[in-house]
Image: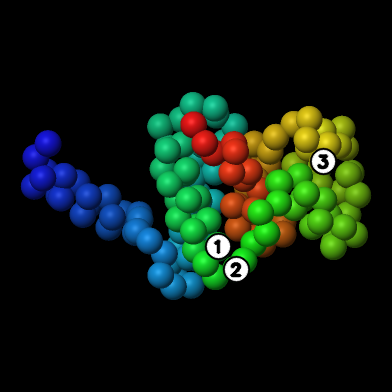
Amino acid sequence: MNMNDLQNVWQEFNRATHISTIRNEKHYTEMVSLADSLTEVIGNAKKHPLLDLFDLVCELIRAYDAEHYAVPDAPAREVLRFLMDQHGLGQSDLPEVGNQSVISMLLSGARQLNVRQIQALTARFHVSPNVFIDKAETLH
């Protein structure tokens, strides 16, 4: 591996993405925006060339959240249930995520959230996408 080539590629990649350990709110906001953009591009694809980048960005956000926002380690379905309760929403009140039966399956754990649904919930509730990603799901 040629370190000069690696350094050049890394510098160009870093200029485009600002990928690094998140150290402040401004950078945190940039990474959340990048994660949102990636979810738009990836959509529902189970295999996509940018999925690893999405995982990396989510891991950076998760690390910052853990240090600065003490997010309880709850399953995504419990977070969704909590947010729905807090906002007085029923299963039919989230059409951007799916119909009532889809929401029911998500809340029961019979179905996992996909990238599009995470994006919709993140936009609706103004929270980090990480709260909807179960740690067990991101392990390969």
Residue 32's x, y, as percent? 51, 58
Q: Look at mark 1 in the image and give the residue it sits on.
A: 66
Label 3 – label 2 distance at C-alpha: 24 Å
Local SS, label 3:
helix
Q: Look at mark 2 in the image and give the residue it sits on.
A: 69
Residue 33 makes an appearance in the image: no
What residue is at 66 percent from the left and 48 percent from the top? 132
Local SS, label 1:
helix
Q: Earlier in the sequence, mark 3 or mark 2?
A: 2
**Tag 3 and tag 1, C-beta contact below 8 Å:** no
Residue 63's x, y, as percent? 49, 58
Residue 139's x, y, as percent? 52, 36
Residue furthest top as drawn: 47
Residue 8's x, y, as percent? 15, 49
Q: Look at mark 3 in the image and give the residue it sits on.
A: 107
Closer-to-camera residue (123/83): 83
